[in-house]
Image (cartoon, rainbow, N blue to C red):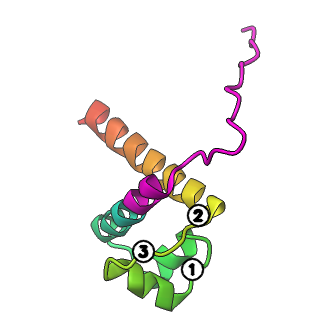
Amino acid sequence: MQLHPIAATPTRLGSPVITDEEAGALARTTVNLFRAWGLTDAEARTLLGGMAARTWARWKDGEIGRIDRDLRMRMAHLMGIHKGLRYRHCQVG
């Protein structure tokens, strides 16, 4: 099997990859996802990079503050994992 290089999509300088609006939606969705997964608060905070308990409690109350780039990407990856698990489940079932 021969592997071919992948052409990377260039990032736009000065423009966030995930907008503030999208990050807020990701945060709300992440809270719901973790509820569906049945995670404890400690497990959820660990997956979010060691988020402070107080910050996580605010998120669960719908108070989403500023979200840094790392956390935006972390949540996006979690959504990808969830999508992959759902896709796999649909293929098997």
Identify the secondary structure beneath mark 1.
loop
Instruction: Decide which of 3, 11 is in the foreground and name it.
Output: 11
Is residue 69 depicted above or below 66 in this figure?
above
Asked whether the beta carbons under mark 2 and mark 3 sit within 8 Å of each other, the answer is no
Kind of residue at disc 3: Ile
Q: Which residues are magenta?
A: 1-26
**Looking at the rendered structure, which numbered label has been put on residue 71?**
2
Kind of residue at disc 1: Met
Mark 2 and mark 1 lie on one chain; the one further toward the N terminus is 1
Residue at the left extreme of this rendering: 93
Quadrant the N terminus occupies: top right
Residue at the front extreme of this rendering: 14
Does the magenta segment cover residue 20? yes
Residue at the top extreme of this rendering: 2
Mark 1 and mark 3 lie on one chain; the one further toward the N terminus is 1
Label 1 CA crowd tier, 10 Å (few <14, some 14–19, many 20+)? some
Residue at the disc numbered 3: 64
Is residue 58 depicted above or below 14 in this figure?
below
Question: For the point 23% across and 36% down, which residue is it?
Answer: 93
Asked whether the beta carbons under mark 2 and mark 1 sit within 8 Å of each other, the answer is yes
State left or right for residue 44 relative to residue 50: left
Residue at the disc numbered 1: 51
Q: In which quadrant of the rendered view does residue 86 lie?
A: top left
Q: Marks 1/3: CA distance?
A: 13 Å
Residue 19: x percent and y percent?
Answer: 51, 51
Kind of residue at disc 2: Leu
> Chief secondary structure of the magenta span?
loop
